[in-house]
Image: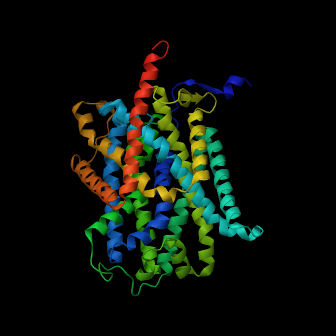
Amino acid sequence: MNPADTAEGSAGQVSRKIGPLTATSIVVANMIGAGIFTIPGIVASQVPGGGWVIACWIFGGLVAVAGALCYAELATRMPEEGGEYVYLKKLYHPVLGFLTGWTSFLVGFSAPIAASALGFAEYIFPGLKNLLPVLSEAEVLWTKKAVALAIILILTIVHYLGVRLGSIVQNILTALKIAIVFGLASFGLALADWEGSAFGFGGGGPMDSFALGTAMMLVMFAYSGWNASAYIAGELRNPKRTLPLSLLAGTGIVILLYLAVNLFVLQAVPYAELRGSIAVMEVAAVRAFGGWMGRSLGLLTALALLSSLSAFIILGPRVYYAMARDKLFFPFAAKVHRRYGVPGASILLQGAIATLMVVLGTFEQLAFYVGFALGVFPWLAVAGLSLARRRSVGEEGAAKAWGYPAVAVFYLISSLMFMIIAFMNRPFASMTALATIALGVPCYFLWVKRVKTAPGS
């Protein structure tokens, strides 16, 4: 074997090997994460009845679909690796493209990888602790972190070894996730007592518009990831067909699953008990199936979280790869592995950052911070679709957004409202998010200066 075949190659083009099934799988896996397993009870605490809960999830799904429709056109106009990085760079200014990659690098992918890994450890630990000796509180904490670090290492290696192996693992994990979520919802609905179900729009006090907006912000956090396949546009076979199909099919599947899960929870748990509950699936499972299902729920949820973790490991490095090719990131991040055909250095870098985050803290502490920071750039991207049309960017390959401009206006107004509410509700976290983004501006000009002064520039 030639040693060069197993080493990182120089910057180059990634292969177009990903088909519609894997692309849709990535969207579904990226959307269904910790949110659906924790958000329903918090949403219920903000609105007075189950009808409002269902309405929030339906409205959130419509916003996600509107965004997906716009991204289908953006991504086919610019079918390259990097998602918003490419769109903002081409439509506005390179500094905005850099800032979306900068934000993704710090909080967009590495933090959710760490959070999903820690969630995996939290859910499987109840089943493991019976096999372990009595541990102190500190030993329990570091045992969970060790489990999280191990799962990050394993899946990072899997995706480093090539798109084919990574696609197989991703498809299997996503199928497991869908089976778990859909099975839980289906069996729960079948066995639940339908008498006295809480689907009314009242009974829990008056509706507060600010509380409703807060509930919607949390719902959209659970829906984040609807644009996932746009990040790997450069690796998709026939992107004009695959991108719209994967974005809309993936988002549609998730909407149906989310509604089914919420119906199950509302049927199984009295509304007063549901409000404010975090471990809603465990509470609902115990009510619907008895104690055994409640104890088993942790292992099932752990499997579901693995799918999201895997999807994040796939997507993030493609952003860093695209930035590095433009000489706006560490040069080694642009290298494509000569044997495996993936941005291997970027995958390893992201794994290292996620590992550090696991050691230092938990993603739950940064939920509002991450949600606000990552809401800014999709908003700018959708707003930029009008610029792309006026400039005829990639006109020949474009899959035109259905219902444009109405879908774009609906998405922009709704998302802006959610960000304003997020700022009002969590000003410190929101200001920290804005500060993180702003910190990227001097970094950008430092990179540009370094490129201009480099030999041969």
Identify the colour scheme used.
rainbow
Residue 377 % position (x, y): 35, 44
Q: Is residue 449 above or below residue 299?
A: above
The answer to whether residue 445 is visible is: yes
Residue 111 % position (x, y): 52, 50
| Residue drawn at point x = 32 percent, y = 72 percent | 52
Q: Along the line of sight, which residue is nearer the eye, 258 or 302?
A: 302
Q: Along the line of sight, which residue is nearer the eye, 396 or 281?
A: 281
Q: Along the line of sight, which residue is nearer the eye, 222 or 67?
A: 222
Find residue 220 and report its image quarter: bottom left
> Looking at this rendering, what residue extends furthest in the top direction?
456
Q: Which quarter of the figure is the C terminus placed in?
A: top left
Q: Which quarter of the figure is the N terminus placed in?
A: top right
Q: Along the line of sight, which residue is nearer the eye, 123 or 134?
A: 134
| Residue drawn at point x = 43 percent, y = 52 percent | 370
* Number of numbered discs: 0
Q: Is residue 100 above or below residue 111?
A: above
> Looking at this rendering, what residue extends furthest in the front direction?
428
Residue 39 % position (x, y): 44, 66
Residue 17 % position (x, y): 52, 36
